[in-house]
Image (cartoon, rainbow, N blue to C red):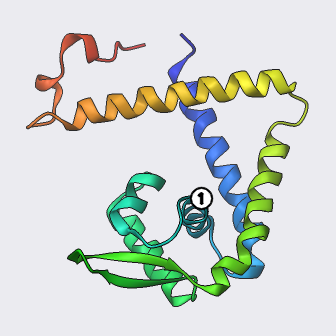
Amino acid sequence: MADFRLLVSLGNRIVQDGQVCLNVALREHGVSSAEANVLMFLYSSGDGVTQDTIVSGVDVSKAAISRTLASMERKSLIVRSKNEFDRRSYRIWLTDRARGLRDYIEAQYKELVIAAAEGIAEEEVEGFTRVLQRVAENLESYRKRRISFPTPGPGHISEAHKLSPR
């Protein structure tokens, strides 16, 4: 197995560099990479979804999504309305401004992916995408096992799920 420190470092570097590039590209429109991630989710899922659906789809904390949505509302990118089926939750709707930015935002993501794949054969990119999909599924499964314990901690993790030290 590859050195876990290198894997963590490369993963963090990829995410950070991607966010920096997106933030620079989106700055002229007053949109952050976090807001663009939510917009991309809404563009693909359709608006009118609940805040909890966005939390699951974007896979960040409720608090982070709440802050991001508040910022997006101030910037006239979304409108929140009470959920008619659950008065404790909100539905999120795209504004005309957000819809008008769709092509630009999607082009920025596409450009970022093209830049990341530069010099890599299409077959390798496809294989890497399959590997990343499997990694994402593995980590989601691992996360669900970890948070399903009543009292998280080393005493509640089976021997099979403990990470071996390097």
**Helix or strand or loop: what does disc 1 sit on?**
helix
Quadrant in which residue 80 is drawn: bottom left
Q: Which residue matches tag 1?
A: 44
Numbered circles on residues, count: 1
Residue 108 as seen in the image, left or right of residue 48: right
Residue 160 picture location, percent across and down: 25, 11
Vertical relation: 81 (above or below) 117: below
Residue 148 picture location, percent across and down: 18, 35
Vertical relation: 49 (above or below) 127: below
Q: What is the three-letter code of the residue carrying label 1?
A: Ser
Q: Residue furthest front?
A: 85
Question: Residue at horizontal 58%, vertical 61%?
Answer: 37
Q: Nearer the viewer, residue 88 or 11?
A: 88
Residue 3 picture location, percent across and down: 55, 17
Question: Residue at horizontal 86%, vertical 27%?
Answer: 120
Quadrant in which residue 8 is drawn: top right
Question: Residue at horizontal 9%, vertical 37%?
Answer: 151
Residue 15 picture location, percent across and down: 62, 47
